[in-house]
Amino acid sequence: MREIHPPVVAALALAAIGLGLLVMVFRNGGNFLVVDNREKSDAILITQGDSLDESYWMGRRLLANGYGSELLLDARSNRTFFGRSQAEWAGDFIARTAANLPGQVRVCKIAADTTAEEVYEAGNCLKGHLIRSVLLVVDDFHTRRSLAIFSRLLPNYHWSIAAVQDPMRFGGAWWRKREWIRTAIVEWQHLLWWEAIDRWRFAPRAALPGQPLRDEGSGR
């Protein structure tokens, strides 16, 4: 019987370990994109996304359960649908569905094309309110990147996030459906672009008067 030399055994073991790690990364690549660390906050912010109806109703439930004292919905003022902007449609929808919550649910008008730009516009909507902590409501596959971007660019607020599931768009077992594959690949591209490029292109916004910048390492 031919003897297998120790170096060959070591190489095979390393190859097996490497293959196992690759399989783990592959299988968990979708779950890594998802973060849900929701905390009770001063305000709830629904960011622009593909699942706005689901996000809105989740935001309403979170508001009813005491996760915030007010709810903001990012809606575009520069996109027209059937003669009205998304922000106008959103305002009418809120008037019909949140009439019993006067002043607690409002539209935050945005025109941003990227999440990083949206952060600055959302920051403008938070100005003038006694808000120090914000709970984001975001499509699940977009949660890790959203939390990273908002935390870096508006460090004077404490951020947490709630994931909105949309099985039509994404699932943790991302390789099982074509739409899930597309969503995972695109989101990974965006996440890597943020970490490598946009993280350094977009500057954190300075603290508002009376709101000192928090220490990012402290978690507050």
Image (cartoon, grey):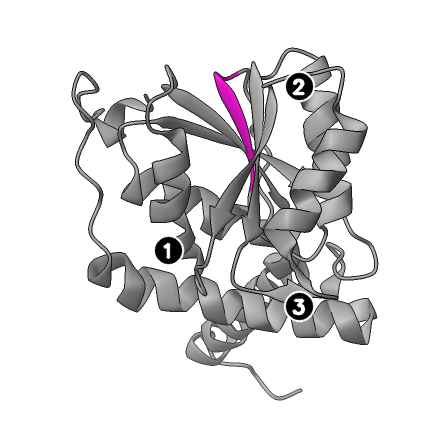
Is residue 43 part of the magenta span, yes or no? yes
Mark 3 falls on what kind of element?
A: helix
Between circles 3 and 1, the one closer to the viewer is 1
Instruction: Bin the neighbour count of mark 2 within 10 Å (Cα to Cα): few under 14, some 14-19, many 20 and up.
Output: many
Identity, as a three-letter code, of the amino acid under mark 1: Ala
Residue 97: which quarter of the image?
Answer: top right
| Separation (CA) of disc 2 from disc 1 | 25 Å
Q: Nearer the viewer, residue 166 or 30?
A: 166
Q: Which residues are magenta?
A: 41-46
| Separation (CA) of disc 2 from disc 3 | 29 Å
Identity, as a three-letter code, of the amino acid under mark 3: Thr
Q: Which residue is mark 2?
A: 63
On the rendered image, what quadrant is the N terminus found in? bottom right
Mark 1 falls on what kind of element?
A: helix
Q: Earlier in the sequence, mark 2 or mark 1?
A: 2
Q: Which residue is mark 3?
A: 183
Q: Earlier in the sequence, mark 2 or mark 3?
A: 2
Between circles 2 and 3, the one closer to the viewer is 2
Mark 2 falls on what kind of element?
A: helix
